[in-house]
Amino acid sequence: MLRNLYLCFLLFIFVLSLSAEDFPLGKLIQDGPATPEQISLYLPVTGELDESIIAHVKYKKDGTSKWLIGHPLHRIRPAATGRKAPKKAYAGVLWDLTSGTTYNIEVTLKKGDISSVKKISLKTRTLPPVTGKATTKIAASSTSAQIQSIWNAAKPGDIIEFANGTYNVDRLQFKTSGSIDKPIVIRGESREGVILKDVKGNIIQVLECSYITLENLTLEGSGKDSGTKSASKAVSFWTASQPQVNFTFRNLNIRGVDMGIMASKAIRGVLIYDNTFNGNNLWKREIITTNSTWNDDGIRIPGQGNSCFNNTFYGFGDCLAMNDRVFNVGVHFFRNDILMTGDDAFEGDYGHRNITFYDNRIQNSQTFISMDPMLGGPVFCFRNISINTGRGPYKLNNKNTGLFIYNNTVVRTNGFGSGKSWGWVQFNNGPLVAWGYCNNLLIWHGKGNTFAMESRGQNPLDFTNNGWYPDKSFWWTGTGGSARSMDAVRKKLPATKPVFGKSTKRHENDIIIGANQFAEEIKLGPDFLTEIKKQYIPKLSKKSKALGAGVAIPAVTDGFTGKAPDIGAVITGRKNPEWGDRSQSKK
């Protein structure tokens, strides 16, 4: 009898252990280096696990009691990913965080009576402090060779300051490293008064070194567009054998260059903020309808733990980008103001996971967002404004998964190429699986039809609560049918499984809206060639049907007022971001 009771007790303990941790999961970790306003998470899946199980996230500041709900982690699906398949895992990002702050995080998976809770405490990166008194000063009469000699002799903690003046330089190089606690600082006496000018090629090349801050001066290039040669570069990272780590670029004017700050191999912990970039491209037909701008990246920061925020851009090609053949993880682009760019505003191509693009404002681009492809995801693109795209808003080419596009506002007119006859057309360049498109606003003033999605797959999928103009043909070629109106196609489409939401029907709660939905009318030209110079904030008018027509999305629509969040980037109840270079706006 006692033996049977003992066996029952052991069985009870075994069942309890199963119910507590029966999911094949590894350790919840921080994914890549810390960044100032995000925490990237990665949770390995170590065995067979139903892909439909959602990993819910909550978090709070350490020492406080108020928990907040984060966006659920994305389940990485190797079979839905092109190229070399990633490992099975969950991944995701917390955003809108405070720099230099510790957060307690819990991730919960549950199915029936079985659940698993993973806990971790992580700290966001502290922004580099204001620098102190200069230890070395560079005289206004200094030659390029003299400047290089001073830089070569720099030691950790040195603060090197240029006196006001224009310095004609020739490919200056960063060669020596600071340390994590004592970076080398190179700065100007004043931002407008110190000009490092190189009309030939790289103004600054970064060799195999780390822990350097460049601030408070102007970099000036050739001032002449070199086409696809992209000869004039502000800062170019040499393809070192080891990643260059912890570079900060802030309070800079960068002008007259084909490329801004660019790397081709992995860099880590790079911060680019409060700068103004002016490239060599113009919004002219002979430039923006050819390949002339395609190599002119404004920012290219492949690698891990890099952040580009609160910058103002004009005159590049792919304005914000990573690079191919690099493991791109935890790279973030937010609150940038792009006035004109000749190709993709955000080229998310080749990102692997935990990439974000949010709270940016773009006017005059050829493509708003490109994912060609993402390599497993997730990438989160939300609360962005895009006005006057030439080719089209979204390019989701190749075999793709883990793309989450929320609360964006797109207003466009007659374009060219793929953007000539459709408000948005996605050709069948590979299947789309496990992705989301919710709360987005697309207003199309051009000739032709509204929307065509030809990519196969489309299951699971969240595609709800979007606003469209006009109601003129909606196609889901190959995955459900096409029709001349949204309501007609919605009735044709078969059921799908959701990713995070509850809807099993594409276009559920989508609405048709009018041509002008905003408190201030957005005035476009007859076609995309009319450059839009007025900077708009597309706040919905009081009569807009898009008000309160969205669905609540954790961490995206937080703070909304009313019965439900609005469709589009400007959400009632949420404070608008401060777009672009903050140091210039305060003058």
Image: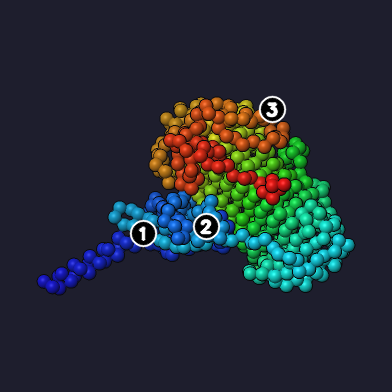
Q: Which residue is mark 2?
A: 39
Horizontally, residue 351 falls left or right of residue 505, namely right
Which tag, 1 or 2, sits closer to the chain's start? 2
Q: Residues within 10 Å of mark 2 (few under 14, many from 20)?
A: many
Q: Amino acid at mark 2?
A: Ile
Q: Considering depth in this image, is 551 or 488 the residue closer to the camera?
A: 551
Q: Nearer the viewer, mark 3 or mark 2?
A: 2
Q: Is the residue 571 above or below the residue 372 in the image?
A: above
The N terminus lies in quadrant: bottom left
Q: Residues within 10 Å of mark 3 (few under 14, many from 20)?
A: few
Find out whether the residues at labels 3 and 1 contact each other: C-beta distance under 8 Å: no
Residue drawn at 63 percent across, 53 percent down: 308
What is the residue that sits farthest to the right in this orientation?
Answer: 141
Q: Which residue is mark 1?
A: 116
Q: Amino acid at mark 3?
A: Pro
Per the model, the C-alpha gap separating discs 3 and 1 is: 56 Å
Tell me the element at label 1. Answer: strand
Residue 235, quarter of picture: bottom right
Which tag, 3 or 2, sits closer to the chain's start? 2
Q: Nearer the viewer, mark 3 or mark 1?
A: 1
Q: Amino acid at mark 1?
A: Ser
Question: Where does the image place residue 35, in percent across and percent down from the top left?
Answer: 57, 59
Q: Residues within 10 Å of mark 1 (few under 14, many from 20)?
A: some
Q: Which residue is mark 3?
A: 526
Residue drawn at 70 percent across, 71 percent down: 156
